Amino acid sequence: MACENILSEECLSLAKSLVESIENKDREKADQILEQLKKKEESLLLQEIGKLTRDLHTALNGFSLDSQLSELAEEDFSDARERLHYVISLTDQAANTTLNSVEEAVPLCDQLHSRVREIKSSWDRFLSRDMCAEEFREFSRQLESCLKEWEGDVVSIKQYLNEILLAQDFQDLTGQVLHRVIELVENLETSLVGLIRVAGKKEKGTSKQNKENNSDIEATGPRVPGVDKWKTVSGQDEVDDLLSSLGF
Amino acid sequence: MKILIVDDFSTMRRIIKNLLRDLGFNNTSEADDGNTALPMLQNGSFDFLVTDWNMPGMTGIDLLRAVRADENLSHMPVLMVTAEQKREQIVEAAQAGVNGYIIKPFTAQTLKEKLDKIFERVG
């Protein structure tokens, strides 16, 4: 559509007619032409407003991408924050479980060590025949009670070591949660790049929704309390009940 | 008893491996996803499969389906140890033919119970 403006052929011929009508002292004609020119100016103004309106509309459409960003900012950021808090609490738990077990096991080892040394020194005296019968009877009783004690201690130490072993599962669980946060940051990056393109008008903004396809059986990693709304079983017991209801 | 442990996190594989050793199963191998695990299962003489669900490459549920579809492996007992805990997922695993389902985090006791139960049924 050719844009009408004051430099158009039509305006020029109107202006020429105006000059002509003034030269001819034709007042009526001159007034008529002036009126026509005024209308033209008004229509130019209207056109300009129309153009501005269209630009605004385009800009607003472009910013629909922005709503995606605000969604990211409002929902996904708080989601990511909760997930990261969950990671902190899992690592905190694991560290505490490990430290508690170590703090219980180390004194047991120390106690074991000092008792072994006691027994060993008595044993050395026995070997070098530096022990009377009465002493030996005492040593035998001591040895018997130690053996019982040690058996219990070793079982306890093994238990603490097992607790430490199991506490390491945090690495798997937090790793899965962190992968999801990384995914979210990548989505944000894509959206920001899109917004920059729209703002820079280098390219038409194509809003690419990267929402994960939450099909019911798709793997989603550990459920983060307070963040993930999907319905899960409450624990191993419910898994067992569900499976037994299915004939397992 | 030769057991294959499949999990993308090496720490979890080590945990399971240690727990299994504690229960008397010393012959274990490891794989980090279904794509690595499947050829190992097809070539090796494994008796038991412990697998995670959420892994890059081939997931545990796809590995389970592939095992059930392979005539040489179809009867192998499969225990799933996973953080996936939606009811739909558990039902899906059951329908795909899983023999046991443990959700993480789990205890040594749970692992022992499930293994005992599976061997009771299979053996």
Image (tube, coloured by chain):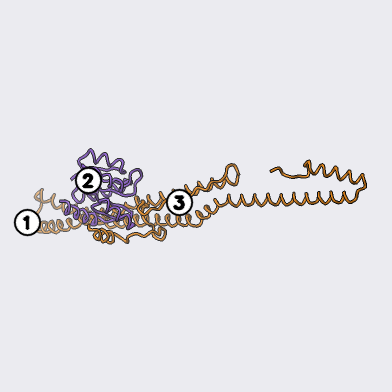
Chain colours: A orange, B purple
The amino acid type found where label 1 is placed reads Ala
Q: Residues within 10 Å of mark 1 (few under 14, many from 20)?
A: few
Q: Name the disc covering residue B100, or none.
A: none
Q: Name the disc covering residue A133, or none.
A: 1
Q: Quadrant of residue A235?
A: bottom left
Q: Nearer the viewer, mark 1 or mark 3?
A: 3
Q: Residues within 10 Å of mark 2 (few under 14, many from 20)?
A: some
Q: Identify the residue shown where x is 86% and y is 45%.
A: A18
**What secondary structure is found at the residue carrying circle 2?**
loop
**Residue A238, image x, y percentages:** 28, 61
User: Is B3 displayed left or right of A221 in the figure?
Assistant: left
Q: Name the disc covering residue B74, or none.
A: 2
- Marks 1 and 3, how far apart at CA: 83 Å
Q: Chain of mark 1?
A: A
User: Is B37 displayed left or right of A5 in the figure?
Assistant: left
Q: Name the disc covering residue A211, or none.
A: 3
**What secondary structure is found at the residue carrying circle 1?**
helix
Instruction: Return the residue found at the far left.
Output: A133
Q: Are marks 1 and 3 in contact (CB under 8 Å)?
A: no
Q: Quadrant of residue A9?
A: top right
The amino acid type found where label 2 is placed reads Ser
**Residue A70, image x, y percentages:** 53, 55
The amino acid type found where label 3 is placed reads Lys
User: Is B17 displayed left or right of A199 in the figure?
Assistant: left
